[in-house]
Amino acid sequence: MGFEKEYVAFIQSHMRVRKGERLRRLTEGSLFAEKLFLEKVWWPLFHQFNFLHPEYEVQDYKDGYRYLDFAYLRPMIKLCFEIDGYGPHMRQLSRWQFIDQLERQNHLVLDGWTVIRFSYDQVKDHPRRCQQITEQIIARLTGHGLGSLELSIAEKEIVSYALQTGKPFSPREICQLLDLSPKPVRRILSGLVEQRMIEPAFTGRERIHGYRLVRETRNPFL
């Protein structure tokens, strides 16, 4: 299906499982800027809306609720996309409203969200720049941007796994991930250590019992 049919199906799928304010925002709210983002930025990149949630509800620091334009949710990943218009509403913000917006974003970050903001004009006039940023941040967070590195398929699978879990991993986990016996797994892990992609996380007297990504690999903004 093309964009329009997929977009309608996408919104309807979320409407079917929502109620109250979460449903009202999809049925009565103005989604023009959000739809433009999907059409000009998201769809040309991915041609699907997997893991994406429109008007996503989160609890704020005042024990109320806020709504994100889009939340991209996967294991260990909470990515927020906000599309900001520069209309009368934005120009007439009071100082306290402006402060509230900054605090809102800061608390999202403290809660483990990665926040990406585009203006409506950026999406409308410079969609390719928005595509590049969107593609890069998702590739960094999911580990799917490893194609440019000179790694084997198995090595890329290990790094991608470590990026998604966000914690140290054991050789046994990698044996299960790759369906390989310990000996070839130890050889692959040693190669990643030599390439400075991973480092020992904890060791015993005779062998390494766990690994973690080095800082440059696990930081999504480097």
Image (spheres, helix red, strand yellow):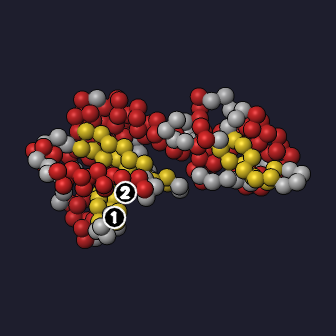
Q: Position of residue 92 (x, y in %)?
A: 10, 47
Q: Which residue is mark 2?
A: 107
Which x, y percent locates residue 99? Answer: 24, 52
Mark 2 to mark 1: distance in Å? 7 Å
Q: What amino acid does circle 1 point to?
A: Tyr
Residue at horizontal 24%, vertical 29%? 125
* SS at badge 1: loop
Seen at 24% across and 67% down, the residue is 21
Residue 38, given in percent of the width and then of the height, sits at 32, 43
In the figure, residue 148 lies in which quadrant?
Answer: top right
Q: Give the mark, 2 or 1, whose residue is nearer the N terminus.
A: 1
Residue 183 sits above or below residue 152 on the image: below
* Badge 2: residue crowd in 10 Å (few <14, some 14–19, many ≥20): few
Which residue position is annotated with label 1? 61
Residue 61 placement: quadrant: bottom left
Query: What's the mark number on residue 99?
Result: none
Q: Does residue 201 lie above or below 130 as drawn?
A: below
From the viewer's side, name the closer residue of 176 and 82.
Answer: 82
Q: Secondary structure at mark 2?
A: helix
Name the residue type under label 2: His
